[in-house]
Amino acid sequence: MSYKIELHCHTSPVSGCSNMKGQDLVRYYAQAGYSAVHITDHFTPWFFAEQDFTDYLYGYHAAKKAGEKLGVKVYLGAELRYESNPNDYLLFGVTEDFLKGAKELLKSTYPEIFAYCRQNGVLIYQAHPFRDGMLETPPEMLDGIEGYNMHPHHRSRNEKAIAYAEKHGLNYLSGSDAHSKEMVGRGGIISDTLPEDSKGLRDLILSGKYELYHEGEVVE
C-alpha cells in the first residue's frame, strides 16, 4: 500500500493568504486521496507582532481534530520567514516547544536559525528558492530545497530549482503550496510507510524512501 503526503499547505486565518480553515483543508485532501498533510502556516515576526503563539497553532489543531475523524494524519510544520530576509523556509520535524524557541529567533540571523534547527534535529528546506524576490541561501546551510512548488499563481521556476539542487547535491521535495480548494493535491510525496508524527515525517525525508508527486504524476 502507498500513501500520498502533502508537504506544503496553509490554513485560514493563521496564514492570511489562505481561504481554507484547517478542518476544510483536511476534508479536501481526504477527498483527493491523501493520507497525510504537513501544515506549514506562515511563521513570521509580523504574525507574532499582533497574535500570540497559541493563535499560530489554531489551524494545525483544527486540522488535526478533523484528521482524526477522517483518517488523515496531520503533521505540525511551519513556513518560516525571518525579519531581515524575504526567503521562506519549510521546517520538518518540529514540535510546539521547538516553535516557541524559534519564535524568539525571528529577528535574528539565518545562521542562528540554522544552528537552532541543527541542535533540535529539525530539517530546513528553502521553499520555492527561485521565485521572484528570493535570495540564494548557501547550500551548505540547507538540508534541501522545494524543487516542485506547485502554486499556480507564482513563477517558481521549478526546473531551475531542480537543476540547482542537483548541481549542489541537495535533496529536493514537492509541495502543492495550497491556499484554496482549487490548489489542493498538486504536489507532495508518495511513500510505502505512513509516519505517525512530525518527527516520523522528518525521518522519512531523511531516508529518501519516497517518490515525488506533482500534477497527477510520480517523478522517477
Image: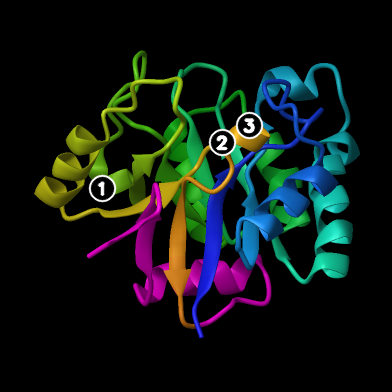
Q: Amino acid at mark 3?
A: His
Q: Reading the chain from its start, which is encountered first: label 1 or label 3?
A: 1
Please tell me which residue is depicted at 49% across the width and 79% down the height of the picture.
Answer: 2
**Residue 212 lies within the magenta run:** yes
Frontmost residue, 35 versus 75: 35
Q: Residue furthest bottom?
A: 1
Decide: marks 3, 2 in contact (CB < 8 A)?
yes
* Residue 50 numbered tag: none
Give the residue at mark 1. 140
Describe residue 131's horizontal placement relative to residue 165 as left or right: right
Frontmost residue, 26 versus 200: 26
How many marks the image carries: the answer is 3
The residues tagged by marks 1 and 3 sit, at their Cα atoms, a distance apart of 30 Å
Q: Residue furthest left?
A: 167
The residues tagged by marks 3 and 2 sit, at their Cα atoms, a distance apart of 6 Å
* Residue 179 numbered tag: 3
Frontmost residue, 84 versus 112: 84
The residues tagged by marks 1 and 2 sit, at their Cα atoms, a distance apart of 32 Å
Does residue 138 appear anywhere in the picture?
A: yes
In the picture, residue 68 is in which quadrant? bottom right
Give the residue at mark 2. 183
Q: Residues within 10 Å of mark 2 (few under 14, many from 20)?
A: some
Report x, y in % for residue 123: 47, 56
Report x, y in % for residue 25: 74, 45
Identify the secondary structure beneath mark 2: helix
| Quadrant location of the C terminus in the rendered image | bottom left
Q: Which one is closest to the eye, mark 3 or mark 2?
A: 2
- Provide the residue span drawn in magenta: 193-220
